[in-house]
Amino acid sequence: MSDTASKLATSGRLRVAVCAVDLLRRTALSRVVAEAGHIVVGAQDTADVVLADGDCLPGETRPVVTLGGADYDLPGVLSRHAGARQIDAAIRAVSAGLIVRLPDATDTGFGAMRETDGHALLTPREHEVLATLAEGLTNKAIARRLDISLHTVKFHVESLFRKLGARTRTEAVAKASERRRHEMITL
Amino acid sequence: MTDQADPLAQFSNALATRAELAKSAVVAIRLAHERHITGMVWQPGIVVASEQSLPRKDDFELVAAGGSVLTARIAGRDPSTNIAILRLAEQVAAPSIAAGEAHTGAVVLAIGADGTGGASARLGLVNLAGAEWHSSRGGLIDRRIVLDVSLARREEGGPVFDAAGACLGMSTFGPRGQVIAIPTATIERIVPLLLKDGRIARGWLGVALQAVAVPDALRETADQSSGLMVMSVVEDGPAAQAGIVAGDIILSVDGTSTHRLRNIARYFGAGSIGRKADLRLIRSGTVITVQTTIAERRAA
């Protein structure tokens, strides 16, 4: 069996370095990688594959799977919204020396600065509540953490759902994380 | 001859002639895995390419008209306008490029490099010609030019010609696979700056920001409904030195409100570097003013 085939065939665990500036995003991606049965290692550790949220550092020599990165020369290029199955498949394929591309890259591209929609903007408090939702906290635990009443927590969570157009807590976290990637600006 | 009189045949012949002529205006920029993208021969020895699709490395192999393989080195890149330039190791003659004005509905011919020294051609329309716009990376693009042209990845970065043979700009991909052109006027503006400095200087605070609603209780004091919340601070950056911390909500920079992002993008142009700026911000429920010195953005 060739090296490529044997790597693909093994149900073996790969060492995956997860690189994401956004903590929320890094936590989510690390979870996806771990749930697919791989081992999450530190950004600088020896790794079979690097999973980068957006662009990876220049001069990266390990095989990289990028989620929405601009460098099409990398072995693995997925969309920012790639699901767990795609990420797992891409990690395995790239570690085996294959290249991974989307049939039609849809969400990359040189776009306009988006002016923010005032009505849907989250308040600082809602951002705090969102961070606790991302940790999987219950309303009770959130109330304790932020030192506010259970009633207030419910109020904020409902407001988050409305502004983000989400029906579940998981969906709210996912949509907020996507929005942050689009709206984050660096000065 | 009946052929000569047939308008469709004339149209077709005219297009084929243009495509043949355009061969000398493009080069293939080789990527890994036998792929390539297109570059535009902009002036002798200088090739313009789409920044977003150009790998982050210094040296490239190019295939010029006729199939000769040349080496080129990156001479500058500007993500804010999606323009990168490569300097060829040897002189290559550049076709003269006349800048054209985009009009909605006008016929366009988009040219790509085929990778072996020839050209590939795409026919379409200017789907939309609009006003200037700001990219998500803060650059000013002189016109909005959306094309009704299908484009392959390998053709991105080639010239887009109008019916008169004038160049409307460089083809590239916008969001959701949309094909757009970076206007010739923008390239004319950016290339000399890149040739001089290798980059477009921009002001820098060293913060990542996200728009947030100003809490109701502070709206009157803040006098605006939204601001930019500091999500992270770059160590040793100007903001860090001024004591800015994550969670601060920046309301204005030197009187320029952060409510409109494009105004802020404009403020942080090259002229802002070294300027002492007053940041008006909300910290733990009160509006305060912090002074900082704007530095120059580090290379990406």
Image (spheres, grey):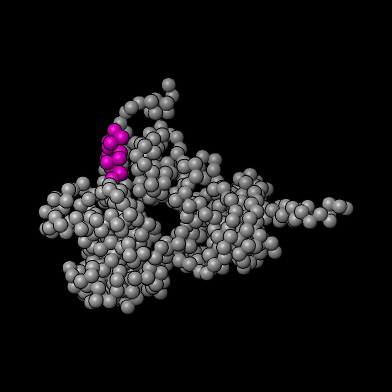
In this rendering, position of residue A168 left or right of residue A183: left
Q: Is residue A82 visible?
A: yes
Q: Compared with residue B147, is residue B28 higher up or lower down, i.e. above or below?
A: above
Task: Write the residue at 62% across / 66% down.
Answer: B103
The x, y position of residue B133, in whole percent, is 48, 67
Q: Quadrant of residue A116?
A: bottom left
Residue B137 coordinates in the image, percent (x, y)? 42, 62
> From this viewpoint, which residue is outermost toward the right?
B1
> Residue shown at 58%/50% (left/top)?
B151
Camera-side residue of A76 and A138:
A138
Where, by quadrant of the figure, is residue B80 drawn?
Answer: bottom left
Task: Determine if the magenta segment contains residue A141.
Answer: no
What is the quadrant of the N terminus of chain A in the image?
top left
As displayed, is residue A185 above or below residue B273? Answer: above
Q: Residue furthest top?
A: A1
Magenta stretch containing residue A39, yes or no?
A: yes
Stretch in magenta: A28-41
Taking the spot 52% from the left edge, 69% from the top edge, the residue there is: B131
Write down the quadrant of residue A88 in the picture.
top left
